[in-house]
Amino acid sequence: MQFPNLFSPITINGMTVKNRAVMPPMGTGYGNADSTVSDRLLAYLSRRAQGGTGLIITEISAVVPRGKGFPNQIGVWNDEFIPGLARIPEALHRHGAKVALQLHHAGRETFETAAGAMPEAPSAIPSVILGQPCEAMSEERIAEVIHAFARAADRARQAGFDAVELHGAHGYLLNQFLSPFSNKREDQYGGSDENRMRFILEIIAAVRKIVGRDFPVWIRVSADELVRGGYDLSFMQKFAPRLVTAGIDAIHCSVGVYSTPGNLAIASMDTDPGFNLFRARALKDVVNVPVIGVGRINNPELADQAIARGDADLISFGRQHLTDPDFINKARTGAFDDIRWCTACNQGCIERLSFEMKSATCSFNPECGREYKGPAPKADPSKRVWVIGAGPAGLSAAMAAVARGHKVEIFERETQPGGQLLSASRPPHKAVFMDWVAWSLQRLKKASVPVNSGHTVSAEEIKQQRPDAVIVACGAYPVAVPIPGLDSKIVADARDVLTGKVDAKGPAVILGAGYVGMETADYLLARGIAVTVLEMQAFPPVGKFTAHGYWLHKRIKDAGGILHFGARVLRIEDGAVRYHQMDTEKVEKAATVITAMGAKSENDLEGVLKELAIPYRIAGDAKSPRRILEAIHEGHKAGEEI
Ligand SMILES: Cc1cc2nc3c(=O)[nH]c(=O)nc-3n(C[C@H](O)[C@H](O)[C@H](O)COP(=O)(O)OP(=O)(O)OC[C@H]3O[C@@H](n4cnc5c(N)ncnc54)[C@H](O)[C@@H]3O)c2cc1C
Ligand SMILES: Cc1cc2nc3c(=O)[nH]c(=O)nc-3n(C[C@H](O)[C@H](O)[C@H](O)COP(=O)(O)O)c2cc1C
Ligand code: SF4
């Protein structure tokens, strides 16, 4: 056994979990509109249990309608939910997993549209991030919500769950009561540490009273809020023993609230793996119940070491469960190299859920959230399918097409597969993107799919060879707005700088402050090259509200990079860029000028495919330049449909 600590059982108040791997709660948006459990949610959860994880904690479930965080969040606020909820433990137990329901009230961190009324909170202070006005809860209402938590825990028990987790973290209602940042009450629920602890301690007492001493109940906390005016780790070290005395059987140690800079609760690739384990350790030092560690841990090896060191007793792997539902079984059976790694990009999961108001998925796993549909039917007849382009769309399409039984061949113009990921993986913290390319190539090799690199497919070749079907995954090429001097020797494209085709010299001036321009700045600054970025828009196109955007801005600022907004470039001169900003003409010295001004789809081959009536699909940037998520998901769909 390679990871003996991770794969040893543990017992929490009579509930024996087969290993130390936990899937922490992750809101999906897969629930039905009436907050009941859907077939989609059930299939998604079952798939994770099938992958070998010992303990699965379901996503936030609302104890009162007014506590809902998003419209189709699952609910547990009346007895009618029990039969639907019961389907979850019934399905997950078949795979040997234990299952807990996470009980939740969003407090002020929601919108009126989701809560169905003005959100309620300890004090009428709107969320710093959402800005939605809220109402301070009366003592009568507090009593009602405490009762609702207790009743919800009992419903979970009746539905067959093995345990419940109280959501006391991430700036939601329980956390709001605990924190001097959000609780400004002057009654018995605010004003002092003791009073701010009262709400949570009363919930635990009420839950215990109704479910009894033998039913496992634990709490998820943010060990440190990491906001000015909030509580810190030393406070949580005082509070944790009180939680245990009140009847808590374990502590799930998360970190951060909504306004924590850089969203450390769901840390991006910019944060080190296992960055939060020291806080789990600090809580373990003061309590005698199991502590669950979490925070950018996707590697079973790191988890095994953390348990061996005594940092935590169990380890939550969040997003890794979305990217590869089988990674625990793969780690257990020695198929470690077959694991598809979560990149912590956040784009397909939390940012899609929070900023795009769409259900969560994973950029790198097109099947996440589609488990209920089952695999695509086998191809009949099996066709000779050409995939043109070995970027994310092409590789994903080829994997889906070969899984259906087609005879697939990939063609790639460059000498190496990967498409734009070859440059996208070069800026700091992004090397992990190439892991997906390596993973895909390994799978394609196993399926005997030839990847012909250094081979540009032309219309002529298609006419001669006449494949049965084609997937056009040719991506997009960089474009720049016409500026006098763009043909100068000092001008290079960002992709060429990142891949090392062009050796950029300082000072460098980058034209465009989108992700490509900003990441190129980050890359050059990390190499000690002075950078100025000129952006035509008046405001930064890369927002600081995403975790990666926040860290990108911070690193560039800390390294002395300069960003000019509202800057219209007039021309590139010998060793300088002349631009116009705020009614003034300015000059910026430049040894290298780097263009990062967008891209245009490459789909020239569509014409010949139409002419020859060869069935085809276009996927990814070749359709329109977007992101990895669209490329991989559209590629997969194309492979399933062709
Ligand atoms: C610096 C940089 C950073 C980025 N960072 C991110 C990020 O963090 N997150 C994100 O979501 N997206 C990011 N992107 C965008 C992302 O990489 C693209 O959206 C994605 O790669 C598109 O995938 P694709 O397969 O459609 O196209 P591509 O990746 O462009 O691949 C197309 C491939 O087709 C080949 N090809 C074209 N024509 C032919 C032909 N006739 N014959 C043979 N081969 C051909 C090309 O050589 C290329 O390799 C970034 C892009 C860049 C440049
Ligand atoms: C899409 C998504 C939804 C989440 N929803 C919840 C939730 O419902 N309850 C909760 O306590 N944490 C939630 N989290 C936080 C995760 O449980 C976990 O703590 C976080 O992703 C960090 O772990 P990781 O780095 O292993 O992904 C969510 C995270 C993601 C990515
Ligand atoms: S979308 Fe990105 S962060 Fe989210 S699970 Fe997938 S790889 Fe991980």
Image: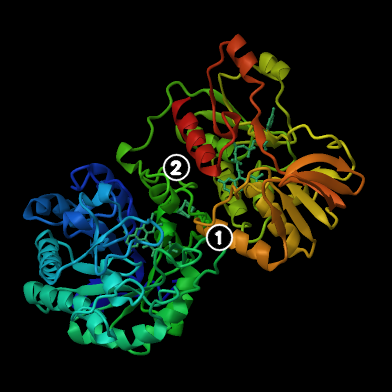
Tell me, yes or no, if residue 2 can be seen here.
no
Rendered location of residue 587, percent (x, y): 84, 50
Look at 48% across and 38% down and name the residue there.
633
Circle 2 residue: 366
Instruction: Name the mark nearer the viewer: 1 or 2.
Output: 1
Tell me, yes or no, if residue 369 can be seen here.
yes
What is the residue that sits farthest to the front in this orientation? 583
Rendered image quadrant of residue 531:
bottom right
Look at 20% across and 80% down and name the residue there.
198
Rendered location of residue 238, percent (x, y): 32, 88
**Residue 22 marker:** none
Residue 120 to residue 608: above or below: below
- In the structure shown, which secondary structural element does the residue marked by tag 2 occupy? loop
- Mark positioned earlier in the residue sequence (1 or 2): 2
Look at 30% across and 57% down and name the residue there.
133
> What is the CA distance from the residue labelled 1 to the residue labelled 2?
27 Å
Q: Disc 1 residue type?
A: Tyr
Q: Is residue 567 left or right of residue 36?
A: right
Look at 49% across and 29% down and name the residue there.
638
Circle 1 residue: 550
Residue 254 to residue 334: above or below: below
Q: Disc 2 residue type?
A: Pro
Q: Nearer the viewer, residue 185 or 630?
A: 185
